[in-house]
Amino acid sequence: MPGTGTGQAITTADHPPRAAGVGPARLLDVTRLASRAGRVQTGIDRVEAAWLDALLANEAPLWGLARIAAGYVLLDRAGLQALRDRLIGAAPWGRPHPLFRLARRLTLQQQGAQSDLWRAARVTCLRAGLGAMLRRHLPAGLIYLNIGHSNLTPRVMQAVRGVPQARVTVFLHDTIPLDFPQFQRPGSVARFRALLDSATQADLILCNSRATEADLRRHMPAPPAIHAVPLGVTMPAPDPAALTTQCPQMPPKAPYFLVTGTIEPRKNHALLLDVWQALADKLPEDHMPALLICGSRGWANEALFHRLDTSPLMGRHVFELPGLDDSALAALTAGARACLFPSLAEGYGLPAAEAAAAGRPLICSDLAVLREILKDYPVYLPASDLRGWTETIEEQVKQGTGIVNSSISGHHYRPHGWRDHFFVALKLT
């Protein structure tokens, strides 16, 4: 049962990074990745997928752990490879086993994914048996890696600590739930606080930037060792044929601008709708640019969803395009007049960095983490500056197609590579 929007979801699929040497046995938690069956991967998913690629390319002993509806599964290297093949669309998801059809909170795709994990597992256990399973089957001195903010619970920490000389490394991507609770789903702030409490018991915390490291130290009075390791940045090759298949009406004939990411409050799509309304009020119809909103609808954004459903701009100058896979999105990105990121908060800004790696002009909100990662490449504007965003975008329309092949600011961006990321990260773990 292949999911939509898989394609090349794992950013390092073509050239998996190899770490120097072999290293200790590692246990990678893949709970989050398995939950993404049938859905386009977002930022943290892509990082966890890159780690799966890197560890599969390394010769060190490798295991995978995932929480499923029936308990836990322990995967060997072959099981992890089977999971990766399904995530990138190289193999189909299987049919849901009757056991997982009873898990009504799971989508049909997730039921199939958990069924496949169960079938591929080296061994399974109920929740109460996790510690015994890990002690029986895993070697002393292994390193448990939790990259995706999922399944990091007291039960898991206690079970891993039961393996002799085991160590724990946790990757934390941001502290947005604590810093911006008004943008969160109900209950997510408490869950994130519990996540940080569990992470405090780790031997090592990795994070994506110095800005995130500072945030973590602010929220964790007595943390373990923390190291900032910038993420790798790649951009899939554009595939116009994939774009035509998935979205035949794209790209539009008018000059267009692109915003990528889940439609959630902190991404600040409302500002861009205000900008496009301001442009529509002053520009002739045949001079209007298009705004392409590439991302699925998220949460706590009913007022914006209502605007998307009712605005006369929709379908004329503003287009909502959920579910595009990476190669189709890359094809759209290649022709964009500029990529827009008006976010109120970011953990890293991986979509912005990927657009910069592809050589696209960027207009971004003025956030410390974006300045750290992207340096002087984008044009930075305050996230609330409606007039500034409107005038900057209008100027880009007036400048014509010549702007497409150069950064607005005139600076060049040299991305950090995944090989660089793992050269440092795997030495630390």
Image (cartoon, grey):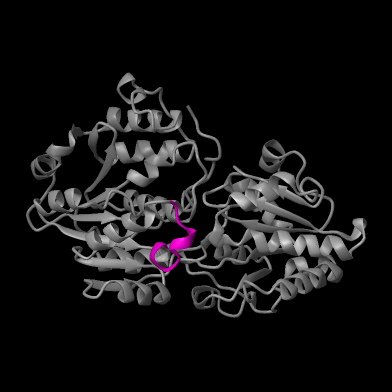
Q: In the rendered view, would you say 295 is above or below 183?
A: above
Over which residues does the magenta segment extend? 177-185
Relative depth, front residue between 102 and 115 = 102
Relative depth, front residue between 35 and 299 = 299
Q: Which residue is pictured at 13% across the width and 38% down the height?
A: 128
Q: Residue 382: horizontal and vertical position, in percent?
A: 63, 76
Relative depth, front residue between 112 and 424 = 112
Q: In the rendered view, would you say 396 is above or below 35?
A: below
Total tally of numbered discs in the picture: 0
Find out whether residue 105 is within the magenta segment.
Answer: no
Q: Residue 126: horizontal and vertical position, in percent?
A: 17, 33
Q: Which residue is pictured at 20% across the width and 59% down the height?
A: 168
Q: 252 left or right of 298?
A: right
Q: Which residue is pictured at 75% across the width and 45% down the height?
A: 250
Q: Residue 81: horizontal and vertical position, in percent?
A: 35, 40
Q: In the rendered view, would you say 236 is above or below 76?
A: below
Quarter of the image with the C terminus is bottom left
Q: Which residue is pictured at 48% across the width and 69% down the height?
A: 416
Q: In the rendered view, would you say 48 is above or below 282?
A: above
Residue 63 in view here: yes
